Amino acid sequence: MLTITHLVKKFGDLTAVDDITFEVPDHSIFAFLGPNGAGKSTTIKMLTTLLHPTSGQMTIAGIDPVKHPAQARKNFGIVFQDPSLDDELTAYENMEFHGVLYGVEKKLRRARIEELLNVVELWDRRGDLVKHFSGGMKRRLEIARGLLHHPKVLFLDEPTIGLDPQTRNHIWEYVKEINRQEGITVFFTTHYMEEADRVAQAIAVIDHGKIIEQGTSEEIKAKTKTTSLEDAFIALTGNELRAEKGTAIDQLRMRRRAWGGR
Amino acid sequence: MAVNFLISIVMKAIYILWLRQLKRYLRSKSRTIGSLGQPVLFLVALGFGFGPIFEKAGAGNYLEFLAPGVIAMSVLFSAMFFGIELIWDRQFGFLKETLVAPVSRLSIMTGRTLGGATVAAAQGVIVFILSLLIGFRPERWDMLPLAFVFLLFISLIFSALGTAIASLLEDMHGFQLIMNFLIMPTFFLSGALFPLAEAPRALTLIAKFNPLTYGVDGLRSALTGIGQFTFSHDLVILLLVVICFFSLGSYFFHKIQA
């Protein structure tokens, strides 16, 4: 479903993604793991037409997202790592906006919005402006929105960050369900290793922009001679903490929070 | 059949983006009311303040002259602001949501620009009504539709320009620069506040290259019957500028990477 060949992305001197090559089979659930700043989100941005690669090739369902971005966009959906809701719209309006933009036909759209808002337990709050939601509620809404249209590939960039175990469970059950029923390929990143262990059929580990290991959870554990994926991950990526440089956007978000909205 | 389907998707995308802008506008009442303060202040302070001098100089009623200029000003400010709001969408992530959607960037840009222009035109109409309360009287009421056309042109031009500029900016740091070096000069050097005919040559020359000059002139001619150029002259230039800025906006918007 996805092929990535010798993909490189440089930002000035920094090589965020350093010549990575891997494949994601059709209809699989694939975990893309790595410490902060390893290059996960940059890779996803390139796959989803938001960034141009420095060099290398990619295909999504056989389509090159660099040469044919509009066609590629028809085949994937994404839940971003950072917030991407419109605070001034209600939960329902955010869903509706997404559905219309993705060409989901009206009857199906209405039915799915209700179903999904129930999955993330926001149906009762559908008429509330998103700016009044807590962080966890926003995250849930964002996931519901990402699942509204059923594409060939679904990218989930740390979808369950900051959510309680019950909600995480709900969401993964739903994701597994649509993967099984509709054969949607799921490509996700997470820092919860037990999630990857439980859900993913195949895993790739990236660090410093390079793929350092791939295989099933069992294969990776066997190779690193560890008993849990968490231990395997630490064995592969080392113990030191990763610093992520704050961007202008993070600074502005802080300022906005300090000013209490707009 | 397939073409019809495609058109309907594009129209729906444009519509939903337009609707979003409108909803945001209707919900931000404090901003709406706040942005009416400046034009009212201009009308009252300048209109009544300079009125007697203007009259003594034999140029007639200043409020009649000023009101179309201030209406144009409120449209200019609103349209630029709603175009530049794109930067907020980028900062707070919502832009990404639209950029990965399977609709062309052109339709996203079109929907946004039309939304911004609609809201700016609404602001202009509100300021027009306020100016009536302050004492402004249009010369001919049957010319109001034509005045509205000029209002729409100003809205579209600066909404598209705002989008074009916002596409190039990463954050709001450049906003002051745009305010002081683009929006303010556009307003002051447009004939909104004083007749260009009597102004020094350098000023009139600059004003000639300012699209707002033709918007203000058309609006003023329609509302008060006093104008420097003919309607067709104003309209042709405004139309060309709309096409030009819209293409520019689409081009820069197309180049955005997140």
Image (cartoon, coloured by chain):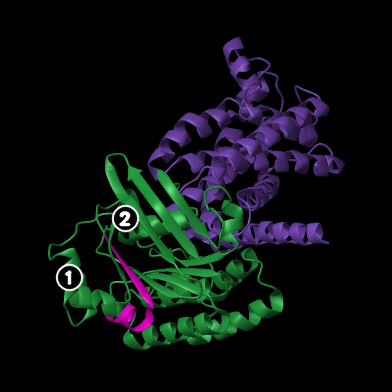
Chain to which mark 1 belongs: A
| Element under disc 1 | helix
Q: Residue at x 60, y 50 (%)?
A: B105
Would residue A7 be found to the left or right of residue B99 on screen? left
Residue A241: image location, x then y, percent = 15, 62
Q: Is residue A5 magenta?
A: no
Q: Amino acid at mark 1?
A: Ile
Residue B36: image location, x then y, percent = 57, 49
C-alpha gap between disc 2 and disc 1: 27 Å
Q: Nearer the viewer, residue B17 or A69?
A: A69
Boundaries of the magenta span: A194-206
Look at the picture and state if B63 lies above or below A142.
above
Look at the picture and state if A158 lies above or below B38.
below
Number of marks present in the image shown? 2
Residue occupying the far left of the picture: A239
Label at residue A234: 1
Mark 1 burial class by Cα count in 10 Å: few <14, some 14-19, many 20+ = some
Chain to which mark 2 belongs: A
Q: Nearer the viewer, residue A158 or B51?
A: A158
Residue occupying the far top of the picture: B201
| Element under disc 2 | helix
Which residue is labeled 2 in the image?
A: A250
> Dividing the picture into quarters, in which one does residue A254 lie?
bottom left
Look at the picture and state if B247 lies above or below A48.
above
- The nearer-to-camera label among 2 and 1 is 1
Q: Which chain is green?
A: A
Residue A202: image location, x then y, percent = 37, 74
Q: Amino acid at mark 2?
A: Asp
